[in-house]
Amino acid sequence: MQRRLFLAAAVLPMAVMTSALAAPGVASPAPAAQGAAGRAGALATGLVSVREVQDVYAADAVIEALRQATVSAQIAGNVTQFYVDAGDRVRRGQVLARIDTRDTDAQVNAGRAGVAQADAAMNQAKLNFDRTQSLVKQGFISQAALDKADADLKSAQAALDVARAGSTQAVTARSFAELRAPIDGVVSQRLMELGELAAPGKPVLMLHDPSQLRAVGAVPQFVLPKLAAARAAAPAMTAQVELPSLGRHLTASRLTVLPTSDARLLSTVVRADLGDAATIGLVPGTAAKILLPVGQAKKLVMPAAAVLRRGELVGAYVIGADGRPQLRQIRVGEPVADGLVEVLAGVADGERVALDPLAAAGALR
């Protein structure tokens, strides 16, 4: 009986404590909410603010190589061998492909035979000239015979020169059967298959130098005065190159505005050269944007890294008053300098956004 009373006395305080915790009006934070708040507090955030930033015009562009070459055939014949394929690195002068040489070999042999024939005729004409000259001195034949022998000698000499030139031309044509790389670089594309007929001027391979790339785009003519004024105010000013597919922003080493305009499109071509280090991982044909400074303006901006794009949805994780990120749909404008983007709607001045949208999404789980 005493043992039962002791157990009841021990259980009673625990029941009272449980009832107090569960009593109405006494709130206890959920463990999941506490974990989410803790993870949200560790997020790196950026400020949405109105700033006077460098106003830019984003010109659609594409990456291309400064040095590129198309290797074409210079003689007719079937391609008998490829020594490289797309993606292979090559050195200047390296043999890339070979064309059937049976026709050119025959031309080389014919050229050599023509030289031998002309050389024999030349020797015969020279002997005839010397013999005629001796007979004229002895008075046995007239001067007219010597003049004819001299003309025959000169004609034979000219025929020999023509034969030698033809032989050299045949040997040169024979060398065209080997297609060699004109530059150091990478094979961009193979335009023919083994056994296809190559013809003079028909492209066979394309090469480019991957260490020297640039972004090439076009800007409307109304942007040119603003761009010229901005460059006059800051001669050392350059442009930024944005690569949306790679999530990279590069600084152009040189900006060139071509001195001609397209009368049909009313646009002017601009080129933004990229440094050697910036070209790592880039290939010609990559879509890009050239961010051209055109002045100063006050804009509502936020870090471009905070923008989340999922198909047609453009949003950002805004840090709420409770410290937790909340996904909010926004509308953004053009990128501006220093890795910022203009915000047109969705957030207000002074709010903070998560710089890593994926980490913010994970903090809500």
Image (cartoon, rainbow, N blue to C red):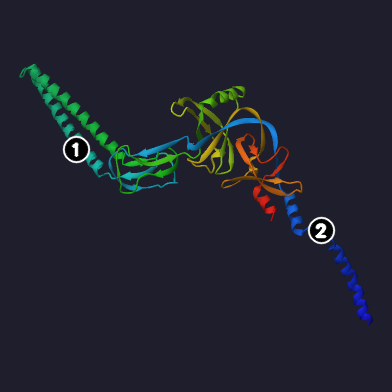
Q: Amino acid at mark 1?
A: Ala
Front residue of 355 and 298: 298
Q: Residues within 10 Å of mark 2 (few under 14, many from 20)?
A: few
Residue 277 appears in view: no
Number of the label disc, if any, that sits on residue 239: none
Find residue 186 and report its image quarter.
top left
Number of the label disc, if any, that sits on residue 113: 1
Front residue of 332 and 170: 332
Q: Residue furthest left?
A: 140
Which of the two labelled residues, at mark 1 and mark 2, occupies the earlier sequence position? 2
Please state the horizontal and vertical placement of residue 141, each as a whole percent of the image. 5, 19
Q: Which residue lies at the image location 22% right of the left edge and 36% below the top edge?
A: 111
Please state the horizontal and vertical placement of residue 66, each as a whole percent of the image. 47, 34
Front residue of 137 and 4: 4
Q: Which residue lies at the image location 23% right of the left edge and 33% below the top edge?
A: 166
Find residue 76 and report its image quarter.
top left
Please state the horizontal and vertical placement of residue 298, each as a whole percent of the image. 67, 30
Mark 1–mark 2 CB contact (< 8 Å): no
- Left or right of 153: which side holds 33? right
Q: Amino acid at mark 2?
A: Ser
Number of the label disc, if any, that sits on residue 28: 2
Looking at the image, residue 311 lies above or below residue 339: below
Front residue of 132 and 349: 349
Looking at the image, residue 95 lies above or below residue 11: above
Distance between the Cα atoms at labels 1 and 2? 106 Å
- Left or right of 271: which side holds 14? right
Looking at the image, residue 364 lies above or below residue 156: below
- Left or right of 233: which side holds 66? left
